[in-house]
Amino acid sequence: MLLVLSEEHKEHLSFLPRVDSAVVGEFGRIALEFLRRGSSPKIYEGAARKLCVPVETVQRGVEGLMYLMTESSKHMISKVDFLDSVLVLGFGEELNQILLQLYLQHHSEIRSILSQLPSNLPGYHNLEWRLDVQLASRAIRQQVVPVLTMRLLLTGGGDGTGELSRRVLQTDPGTLLHLISTLEGALAAIKTNHARRIFRNIK
Amino acid sequence: MELSESVQRGLQSLADPSSFDRRSYQVLVDVSFRSLLSSQADPSVLDQPELKQIDQILLKQSHTAATTFILEAVKQNADKSTISSCLEELSFSADRIEIFYSTHQEHRKEVERLLASIGRCPPHIHDASWCLQYHVKNDQVDKINEPFYLISLNTEKERSSDDINFTCTVEQLQIPDVKLLVESSVLQCPGRHNKRQSE
């Protein structure tokens, strides 16, 4: 699969052949840091001063490089397709190889960072639980009621941050056994021929 | 059992054959239990033909006293001798005590359930639903190709229900210890509510 680069993207990347390979490597490193930790304007300013170019040029070059890496990693494109995609930029062979190495070395890491981006669904993180026996309440005394109290921790707090949301829930042992057998049915579903056929054929 | 003065007075009227004859006494006892257990307050609960002859204010005071006494007896899990001695002190005849106690025995479990359902507690899980999906891709990453589960826990809190939805992986769903732990805990925990609570 070939990447289709927009004119704007090509323009941002056109800065790269004007600097030497060490600088391209440095830009690659900055681009990855950007993915891991977010960008820092000071870094762009420092580089712009050293290269005597406007800050925007450096920023766009780095962001263009980052976008090239994320798109390639997202689609898991092959070596050949990557080289064919950057061919259209008209760079020299050496620069193409530097970009390819950058991609090959970091695509797994980039994919895992992209997967951690907040999804639109809350995800299971952990379940803490305790078993208690309720003996009395304001309304009734002399009870013997087993109660299972749980704290369900979910990721994807809904506000887009990595914050965990916490829900305190209760159930009784009878319902819990029912829940467990229901979820065992869920686990059995993945072992069916139907599921296996889908896993084999959608790649 | 501690009873307030107005409850004691109301009960004493109920014990008095000149205020309530045997038939109307039985009807009032039945009506008192029924008014506690019906899901909606019925303003016409005291409109029984057997109760028409009785002074309406006295009737209401006795009804209030009877329902308070019933709730207190169930709340404290009072046994037969406690109920009997309490009513004896308020001048109930043996016959009337017997009528009250047998009606109490008939409805006791339901009143207990009613009282047990009052109070604040975290949302109670009643059921769970699941579906198995195959994650193909999303807007950030292509070619994911992994199965995952969408779980929905159906909870209820004070008559309103809520669903908690979340995803989990196949590994996360496999919690082998929990079932053994719960089964062994359930065996150690005798009790009158040790079964799946009905709605």
Image (spheres, helix red, strand yellow):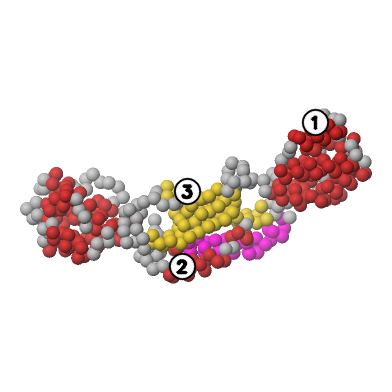
Q: State yes or no: discs 1 and 3 in contact (Cβ < 8 Å).
A: no
Figure quadrant of the N terminus of chain B: bottom left
In this view, the residue farthest toward the top is A54
Query: Chain under label 3?
Result: B
Please name the residue that numbered disc 2 is placed on.
Answer: B185
Q: Earlier in the sequence, mark 2 or mark 3?
A: 3
Residue A165 in the image: state x and y as whole percent: 55, 48
Please, what secondary structure does the residue beneath circle 2 have? helix
Regarding residue B76, the answer to whether it shows in the image is yes
Image point (12%, 64%), residue name: B94
Please tell me which residue lies in front, A178 or B89. Answer: B89
- The residue type indicated by label 2 comes to Ser
Total residue callouts: 3
Image point (27%, 46%), residue name: B41
Please name the residue that numbered disc 3 is placed on.
Answer: B162
Do callouts 1 and 3 point to residues on the same chain? no
- The residue type indicated by label 1 comes to Val
Image point (41%, 52%), residue name: B121
Of tags 1 and 3, which is closer to the observer?
Answer: 1
A189 falls in the magenta region: yes
Do callouts 2 and 1 point to residues on the same chain? no
